[in-house]
Image (cartoon, rainbow, N blue to C red):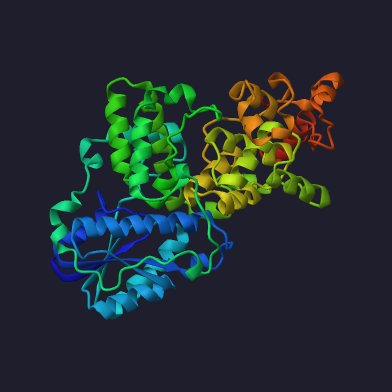
Amino acid sequence: MRHDKSLVWFRRDLRAEDHAALYHALKYSRQVVCVFVLDTEILDALPRRDRRVAFILQSLEALDHALAALQPGAGLVVRHGIARDEIPRLAAELGVDAVYCNHDDEPAALARDAQVSQALARQRRAFLSFKDHVIFERSEVLTGQGKPYGVFTPYKNAWLRQLTPFFLSSYPVHRYAAALAPCPARGVPGLASIGFEPLELPPLLSGGSARAEALFQDFLGRMDRYDRQRDFPAFKGPSYLSVHLRFGTVSIRHLAREAWTRAQAGDAGAGVWLSELIWRDFYHQVLHHHPQVVTQAFRPEYDRIEWASGPEAEAHFAAWCEGRTGYPLVDAAMRQLNETGYMHNRLRMVTASFLVKDLGIDWRRGEAYFARQLLDFDLAANNGGWQWAASSGCDAQPYFRIFNPVSQSEKFDPEARFIERYVPELAALPPALRHAPWEAPPLALQAAGVVLGRDYPAPVVRHDEARATTLARYAVVKSRALPDA
């Protein structure tokens, strides 16, 4: 069905190329106007100094320029208000026949979109939504019995069997760019004008499609080493594209196509990175089929666990948040998060395990803290990762994991370079002693000028004792003895 005039509503898809909704709107409309709403229902709950808002505004500036490059005079309309009100209002002002957008399967977004769709229907306007954020979504990959997968490896195998070049094909937006209408009111507001404090993002974490592509091109030169380097936080192993995937400044099809092609040719690093992209799809389909995971355990029996509470638990939680647990790798990771909004993926697992399995604190509290701090926060992935760490989520193992923070440190930061970067008070210690400074000889501590409890905290718990407590706490679910990871 063709439309005379349409509106494309950008959300978590801030790019002008390989964009499903924009492609369909341009192809089937005579004129297309593009809009992004700085949704106050989301923004009002955020701290006034929020890296994600800065990233979004940078990306909107880039998107505005990209649309103008596609068609002179085109650009992005930016509204600041309640999105479920602003979209129907703008649709009426412009007299459009349809609003196009891409799917967002987070529960709050689905509720918002339902309200927008109903409001548009009352105005006799269409609301059209498309898959864009993942390769396979919702119920596209199911078991032989037609049910959603609850374990990753069978899902991955089915995902790979189902994959063909078609699903990785890009949407050639440029072919129909002539349909982009002159923008009625271009201009992206600054942070201050929408009530946020000025904030500079480091180049590695800055927004926009050009930055995403530059990161990807850099990663292509080392993708073949990803399987060997990805777990070492002191090395340049990851792609650093997670925030760009979160806000859609890069197309998932573009990334997966390159990874799949290289993996098909035998590139082990590309195959492992493709698995990470499949994990992302997996967690999104889990959220779609099991929206209750936002507040409850994927495995309901795990909600019977009694988590630590009281003054000591609160003190432990504060120490974890602030990076002063006395476990250097955990503290370095939390300080990296607090300082930059980024945390290495291996360290997300280590810090989550420590909070849940060493401190006995409800995984939901850690999930919420990450949600506030992570620049790349994505509800599906964050929830999935935390439930994996808490053993309450999608896990094929017949036992739960307890990461030993010291052995993880020795294995993945063997020279303690990452620790040195974020826990400089231990830098004068020999690298081998930085992993567990409480075990360092007194003379070594003295020579380094380190007094535990003064210069660096003593451990808030002893891992072996905490592990025994955790086994007892989880006995309401499982009782098998567990090895350290």
Along the line of sight, the residue nearer the viewer: 181 or 186:
186
Where does residue 319 sit, x and y in percent of width and height? 74, 45
- Expressed as whole percent of the image width and height from the top left, the position of residue 38 reads 43, 66
Q: Quadrant of residue 418?
A: top right
Q: Is residue 275 left or right of residue 97?
A: right
| 301 to 112, vertically: above or below | above
Q: Nearer the viewer, residue 26 or 445?
A: 445
Q: Is residue 5 left or right of residue 43?
A: left
Q: Where residue 177 appears, x then y in whole percent?
A: 16, 58
Above or below, 220 against 146 in this view is: above
In the picture, residue 216 is in which quadrant? top left
Side (left or right) of 168 relative to 247: left
Q: Quadrant of the N terminus?
A: bottom left
Q: Is residue 354 left or right of residue 8?
A: right
Q: What residue is drawn where x is 35% and y is 39%? A: 214
Question: Which residue shows up at 70% across the image and 46% down it?
Answer: 322
- Is any part of residue 32 visible from this angle? yes
Quadrant of the rendering where the C terminus is positioned: top right
Residue at 59% of width from left, 42% of height from top? 392
Please tell me whether residue 442 is drawn above or below residue 456 in the rendered image. Answer: above
Regarding residue 136, the answer to whether it shows in the image is: no
- Image label count: 0
Residue 109 in percent (x, y) is at 43, 62
